[in-house]
Image (tube, rainbow, N blue to C red):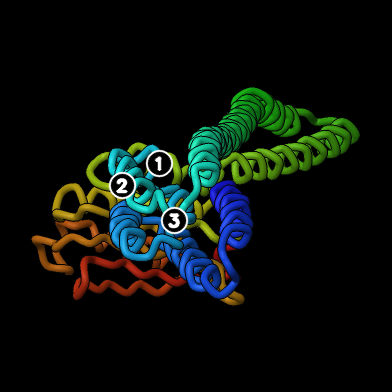
Amino acid sequence: MTNLLNKLVLLVILIILTIYNLTIQISILPIIIIIAICCFLEYFENENLSFYVFIVYFLICLVYPQFTYFLPAVFYDLLFTKNQKFILLCVIPLIANINYISANNMIVLIVVSFIEILLKHKAIQLNLTQSSYINQRDNLTEKSIVLENKIRELTEKQDDEINIATLNERNRIAREIHDNVGHLLSSSILQIGAIIATTKDENTKHNLGLVKNTLNDGMDSIRNSVHDLRDNSIDLYMQLKNLIDNFTFCKAVLNYETNTNFNIKTKYAIISIVKEALSNIIKHSNATEVIISVYEHPKIVQLIILDNGKCNKEIGSTGMGIEGIRQRVNNLKGILNIDNSKGFRIFISFNKEEIA
């Protein structure tokens, strides 16, 4: 934009100078041609093309003196380039046309040329400043994006760590209740049962029976609470993510797109199936990538384990642990399909009603 404004100002000055010294009839053709040349060079912005145009225009000036007035506009694009030394050729048309162009006009053209050099220098400096600003802005934007991603990753990692710590604490509480309170209540129930068996007082037996029933109810309540804590303490996504993160044999990707709250039996089964599949990949496959996906649909949940390797054993071979996977799927009343036509794929479907 700066170069365009400089050229426009330069053209206006040279056009006024030409019209002032020449007639309209003589001036019109050089004006039209120089405007066309400036637009042409501005559009293509090519140093070599500017050089060739300058040489052609230089030759034209030797034949048609009226074109000499616009020499500064033609060599503008050669300034501060590898071809700028050829600008000295402009002296030849000025000397050759000394009888056509007055001394005053030559002085004006020389002054305009120096002004043109200053304008081009300022334009280059401005362009460099703008380029530097744009580069700095882009670098800052890129760093900002990277920083935001790092912050998000740290936040997600922190949330995962908090979630893991919470689940571990639930496990600890469940074990404490089971090992301490549960055992104490069980012992108390057995002792009361023994007392009931040995006492002869019916009233005492009745009261102890009431206490025993209360303790049994409490024991059932604690057992249910412990089971609930244990069920909720296993985060299937975190368990699968941990397996993926620790799998170093090849690239592993986890796609987890479900909000179903699986029961404890299903969680253990899915974790065991994935472990067995990853173990089989290490033992029997040359895969370079494995994708583990858990997808939720209106009625079913799908577990898909896909690798791009070629299995070196038959699908039905017991060495691959397929039978163990099949038994776990059958226990959950799921459907198992295995395909090795393109890589190796384990495709499992579970009914939501059976696993939630």
**Callout 2 environment at 10 Å: few (<14), some (14 to 19), or many (20+)?**
some
- Which-is-in-front pick, marks 1 and 3? 3
In the depicted view, which residue is nearer to us: 290 or 25? 25
- Is 255 above or below relative to 155? below
Report x, y in % for residue 155. Answer: 62, 33
Residue 182 horizontal side relative to residue 43, left or right: right
Secondary structure under badge 2? helix
Which residue does the numbered mark 3 point to in the structure image? 100
Name the image quarter holding the C terminus: bottom right
Image quarter of residue 174: top right
Residue type beneath disc 3:
Tyr
For the point 27% across and 54% down, the residue is 289
Secondary structure under badge 3? loop
Q: Which mark identifies residue 136?
A: none
For the point 55% across and 75% down, the residue is 25
In the depicted view, which residue is nearer to us: 20 or 196? 20
Which residue does the numbered mark 2 point to in the structure image? 92
> How far apart, in angstroms, are the residues tagged by discs 2 and 1?
18 Å
Q: Earlier in the sequence, mark 2 or mark 3?
A: 2
Which residue does the numbered mark 1 point to in the structure image? 79
